[in-house]
Every structure is written in structure tokens, then in C-alpha cells.
Image (tube, rainbow, N blue to C red):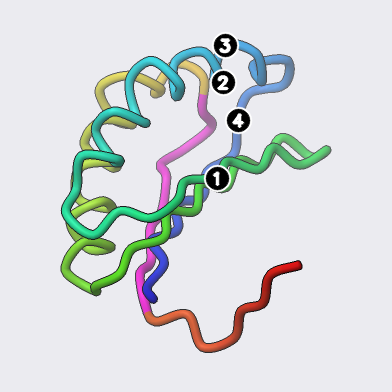
């Protein structure tokens, strides 16, 4: 199992618009990547936004980050402070209820 993680700082008060744009635009792009398993977005109290995609292969995680960063630049720029960053790698610990 592999995770692709994108991280950015949002402008204050933009959570609802970010969620709408992500649901309409990013999810279809990421979920179409081969090996896709799950997608989560966390919006922290300090306006930090973290998107986590889970894949069954490293190539999928890397491709998701490539697609997501391009999409973010084209669609979320006005809602963010600075550039989004991305990392990908193997999930070394996990559990489920």
C-alpha cells in the first residue's frame, strides 16, 4: 500500500469552496489513476489542507501527485497561500477498526 500526500496552506475562510472544487475536479482525476484505493482531505484549524490518496502501487501514488499538483496550480491557486507540496511512499503502518 502506498500513499500520495499533498499539503498546502489555504486562505482563511476558503474551506467550503476548496471542498466544492476538490469534489468536482480533483476526485475524478485522482480516482481514475490505476491502483486507486481511497482519498481523504483534512482541513485543519490553522487553514492547512492535506490530501491523502492511497494506492496499491507506488507508480499510482506518483502519478496521482503529478496530476494533482498540475490540477491544483490550474484550479486552486487563488484559494491558497503559496505552492502545494507533495510526497509519496509506502505506508509502513496501518490499521482499521
Badge 4 marks a residue whose secondary structure is: strand
Instruction: Please give left or right for residue 41 compared with residue 56 in the image.
Output: right
Between the C-alphas of marks 1 and 2, the distance is 11 Å
Quadrant where the image shows the C terminus: bottom right
The reply, left or right, for residue 86 in relation to residue 65 is: right
Q: What label sits on residue 19 in the rendered view? A: 2
Question: Which of disc 4 and disc 3 is earlier in sequence?
Answer: 4
Disc on res. 80: none
Q: What distance separates the C-alpha of mark 3 from that of mark 4?
A: 11 Å
Pinpoint residue 91: horizontal percent, then vertical percent.
47, 80
Question: Toward which corner of the image does residue 89 lie, by quadrant?
Answer: bottom left
Indicate yes or no whether the magenta region holds residue 67.
Answer: no
- Disc number lying in front (4 or 1): 1
Residue 17 is marked as 3
Q: Nearer the viewer, mark 1 or mark 3?
A: 1
Disc 2 to disc 4: CB gap under 8 Å: no
Quadrant of the rendered image containing residue 4: bottom left
Mark 1 — residue? Answer: 40
Task: Give the label on residue 10, or none.
Answer: 4
Q: Is residue 79 above or below residue 29?
A: above
Region in magenta: 80-89
Lateral position of residue 80 relative to residue 73, left or right: right
Distance (Cα) linking label 2 and label 4: 11 Å
Q: Main secondary structure of the magenta part?
A: strand
Amino acid at each position: 500500500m502506498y500513499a500520495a500526500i499533498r499539503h498546502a496552506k489555504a486562505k482563511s475562510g476558503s474551506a467550503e469552496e476548496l471542498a466544492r472544487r476538490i469534489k468536482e475536479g480533483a476526485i475524478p482525476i485522482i480516482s481514475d489513476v490505476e491502483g486507486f484505493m481511497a482519498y481523504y482531505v483534512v482541513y485543519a484549524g490553522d487553514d492547512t489542507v492535506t490530501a491523502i490518496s492511497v494506492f496499491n502501487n507506488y507508480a499510482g501514488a506518483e502519478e496521482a501527485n503529478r496530476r494533482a499538483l498540475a490540477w491544483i496550480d490550474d484550479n486552486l491557486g487563488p484559494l491558497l497561500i503559496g505552492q502545494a507540496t507533495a510526497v509519496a511512499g509506502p505506508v509502513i503502518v496501518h490499521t482499521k477498526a
